[in-house]
Amino acid sequence: MVTSRDAWKLIGILALCYVGVQIILALMLLSFRSWFGIDTLVLLNALSLLIILLLPTLVYGLAKGWNLREAFRLHPASWQVIAATVLGTFALGLAVSQVVLWLVQLSKHLPLLEHSEFINLLSAISRTKSPVLLLIAIMLPAFPEELVFRGVIQQGFEKRYTPAGAIVLTSLIFALFHLDPIQGLIVTVIALFWGWVVWRAQSILPSLIAHALQNGLTIISVLITAAQKQEGVFEPLQLQSVEPYWAAAVGGLLFWFAMVIILTRCLPKRGEKDGSTANRTHTDQVRVANGNDGGRSSELDERSGLEG
């Protein structure tokens, strides 16, 4: 199936697609900037991610003869695992956000903060004319991002590196993809948690649902914070003026740790996922016998090269 060689090749392809699409979007904005509101810009960015991430991955996977369900890790997960992952994500996000607010306070006069697209986006969200459209546009990128990064790329890295190495490497590349140091810090920490859950569950569903809901919760909290009680008017959110709430950070970390304990009890041990491992092993044996190993032989070659 997916190998580390495939993962690295795919990262290169996605990087080229990303640069190309960003150039096209930049030219469009220069020419038609007055046509786009914040809602349209965010929705356009979400749709571009489908082209940048999902479309090249699908084409590459079909060309390699992948079983797309296996490649994207579209396996079922229990509601307990999904619920604990979602709640753990909310708690960890709360804790990390307080640290980010603290860093924003320390670096409020630095050019890095002024040029942060993530900070500017949060400040501009209050100008939305359609909160529902904005919410959908913010939640939508979770689908291609999770399917590609923790579905395909992390799976490929797991074939060559240790689980911890694969999770860390995928999380760092995922953070770099955002091209923003502030947002990169946030997503790196949470992505490590998602990567661990996906590796243990061998399912993308918990992180995909948690990612989408976390994005949505972020937007809702920003809109609530920016909204005035009088006449429902919105003011631009100035993160530089928001003080971190350390009690929330500590409480979030403690709650997240409790969710991790629950997950360690709910998640199957690696290789004991409802007998699916044995079924896939049998399928691989049949494919090898028929001369169609679906990329398995390259995985074995990869492992053999390391062991040698």
Image (tube, helix red, strand yellow):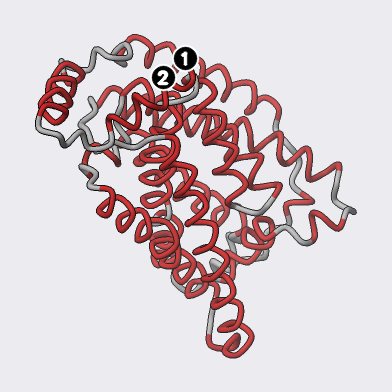
Cβ atoms under marks 1 and 2 closer than 8 Å: yes
| Crowd band around label 2 with a 10 angstrom C-alpha radius: few (<14), some (14–19), many (20+) | few
The quarter of the picture where residue 165 lies is top right
Could you classify mark 1 by the number of other residues whose Cα lies within 10 Å: few (under 14), some (14-19), or many (20 or more)? few
Tell me, for residue 304, which label it has, or none.
2
Residue 130: mark: none
Q: Position of residue 61 (x, y in %)?
A: 29, 50
68 vs 13, left or right, is: left
Residue type at mark 1: give it: Glu
Determine whether 113 is above or below 162 in the image: below
Callout 2 amino acid: Ser
- Asked if residue 260 lies left or right of residue 243, the reply is left
Count of numbered marks: 2
Q: Where does the image place residue 305, in percent across and percent down from the top left?
A: 46, 22
Residue at (43% x, 55% y) in the render: 141
Q: Describe residue 253's horizontal placement relative to residue 144 as left or right.
A: right
Instruction: Specify the label residue 307 is tagged with.
Output: 1
Quadrant of the snapshot with the N terminus: top left
Of residues 173 and 79, the one drawn nearer to the viewer in this rendering: 173
Looking at the rendering, which quadrant does residue 197 occupy? top left
Residue 291 in percent (x, y) is at 15, 34
Gap between marks 1 and 2 measured at Cα: 5 Å
Task: Residue 199 in the image: state x and y as whole percent.
Answer: 38, 24
Picture residue at 50% right of the left edge, 28% below the top: 167
